[in-house]
Amino acid sequence: MAIQIKNLDQLKVMRRAGLVVAEIHQSIRAVIKPGMTTSALDAVAAACIKRNGATPNFLNYHGFPATICVSVNEEIVHGIPGDRIINDGDLVSIDCGAIVDGWHGDAAFSIGVGKVDPQDQKLMDVCEESMWRGIAAGSENARLSDIGHAIEQYINSQGKYGILREYGGHGIGTEMHQEPHVLNFGRKGFGPKIVQGLALAIEPMITRGSEKTKVLGDDWTVVSTDGSRGAHFEHSYVICPDGKPFVLT
Ligand code: MG
Ligand code: MG
């Protein structure tokens, strides 16, 4: 499928979807605490989407059974909310999206709950900063692979972290996942040119150990094979018709 280029009117609708996603993030940050179940966080997200008149895009996506992904500790992405109780010191990654008038938003963050291990905090800080470096590298006229290069370079400059290889960012628009796929590693100067109207979700996923992962028996939850904790940050951004990058979420 070709890369979808959006005009300003379409981007304005995407911004509305992005603001719903941002509000879900805020709502979850406000309530998350030890003793909660991961499904309670899902309910917070579902209520937020509903009161905004938006539609969840994760629910029923290839059969995904919930509104958001909640991944705890060694779970890195695609965790299914359920009865799991969040404990003091857990590292929780939340990924969510929303659709407004047919246009998608998608963003994720990790958060330490209660007393956070400084090593976990560093993991999250490195992951988040690498996302911003990736977005900054993906400015107008850059090449797609410049994004992954910047992400990988920064992470590797901060210590020994596993950068997930099988998962990455993506184009976003009238579907949540569009071309192009965006690697979180690689060499500079390859792939399509970043142009006005291109919207990308940038989402590094890293662990404190190995980059090797497996999918649990629920067919969704991605865990580190060595049990090391993971972090995941994501924002969707666009190069506006004036050439400037703008974070939608
Ligand atoms: Mg995404
Ligand atoms: Mg996401």
Image (cartoon, rainbow, N blue to C red):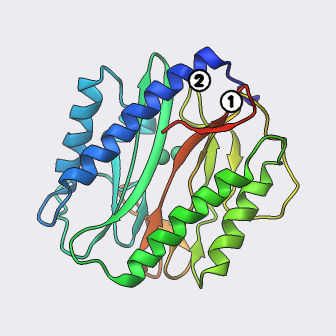
Q: Amino acid type of disc 1?
A: Cys
- The residue singled out by tag 1 in the image is 240
Q: Quadrant of the N terminus?
A: top right
Residue at the image position 25 percent from the left and 25 percent from the top: 50
Helix, strand or loop at mark 1: loop
Disc 2: CA contacts within 10 A as few (<14), some (14-19) or many (>=20): many
Look at the image and tell me whether residue 225 can be seen: yes
Residue 139 numbered tag: none
Q: Is mark 1 within 8 Å of ligand 1?
A: no
Which mark is in front, 1 or 2?
1
* Lateral position of residue 51 relative to residue 209, left or right: left
Query: Percent from the top left, x then y, of residue 183?
Result: 69, 56
Residue at the image position 53 percent from the left and 66 percent from the top: 127
Residue at the image position 51 percent from the left and 20 percent from the top: 13
Assess whether mark 2 and mark 1 are in contact (beta carbons under 8 angstroms).
Answer: yes
* Lateral position of residue 208 relative to residue 116, left or right: right
- The residue singled out by tag 2 in the image is 11
Q: Amino acid type of disc 2?
A: Leu
Query: Percent from the top left, x then y, of residue 46?
Result: 25, 35
Residue at the image position 16 percent from the left and 57 percent from the top: 37
Q: Is residue 248 above or below residue 147?
A: above
Disc 1: CA contacts within 10 A as few (<14), some (14-19) or many (>=20): many
